Image (cartoon, grey):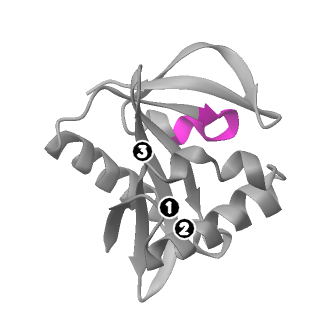
Amino acid sequence: MLLHFKGKETVFFSKVQEIRESVFVDEQKVPYNIDFDKFDRSSTHFILMTQGQAVATARIRETEKGTKLERFAVAKKYRGNQYGKELMEGILDFHKSNELLPIYLHAQEDVIDFYKKFGFVEEGKTFHEANIPHRLMKFEH
């Protein structure tokens, strides 16, 4: 079941926090204050639940460039079960049904091929965020 909510004032945000802290802060060594930022309050968060467990999360927010997909993460023990695919499909359905602005993301280089499967295309050169190489990718319907 894919849930979405605005801001961080819900019981579900703690589940988002658990996944992101495990993936980004613990595994990837992203500083906590970079992963959890001022945009959490205004973003739309997604959380994928299966059998009562939170398995994946992401957020979207509006920027001057369009709708930005961020903080896409699957909990380590649930990887390899197509939960990332399910989460992405749900976010893209939400995006289409709400007629949001063009969607884009900053993909970590090691997962670019994952995003390509959904119609995202690379643009520009590699850049670093939180000391991790990324590429700009835009969604082409």
Indicate the quadrant containing the C terminus: top left, top right, bottom left or bottom right: top left
Picture coordinates of residue 7, whole percent (x, y): 43, 58
Q: Decide whether the magenta segment is chiefly helix, strand or loop.
A: helix
x and y percent of residue 86 in the render? 37, 60
Marks 2,1: beta carbons within 8 A? yes
Query: Front-most of 36 and 94?
Result: 36
Q: Amino acid at mark 2?
A: Val
Measured in 3D between alpha carbons, the distance from the residue under mark 2 to the one under mark 1, in whole angstroms, is: 6 Å
Mark 1: which amino acid?
Answer: Thr
- Please name the residue shown 41% across and 69% down the image: 48
Q: Which residue is mark 1?
A: 57
> Left or right: 113 with respect to 26?
left
Q: Quadrant of residue 25?
A: bottom right
Query: Which one is in front in this view, the residue at disc 2 or the one at disc 1?
Result: 2
Picture disc at residue 16: 2
Front in this rendered view, residue 111 or 103: 103
Q: Position of residue 21 (x, y in %)?
A: 70, 64
| 138 w.r.t. 130: above or below | above
Disc 3 marks a residue whose amino acid type is: Ile
Classed neighbour count for the residue bearing mark 2: other residues with Cα under 10 Å, few (<14), some (14–19), many (≥20): many
Instruction: List the residue tagged with mark 3.
Output: 60
Q: Is residue 66 above or below residue 43?
A: above
| Count of numbered circles in the view | 3
Magenta residue span:
107-114
Q: Which mark is residue 100?
A: none
Query: Residue 20, how many percent across, how many down?
Result: 64, 62
Query: Front-most of 50 and 14?
Result: 14
Return the disc, 2 or 3, that comes first in the chain's sequence: 2
Q: Secondary structure at mark 1?
A: strand
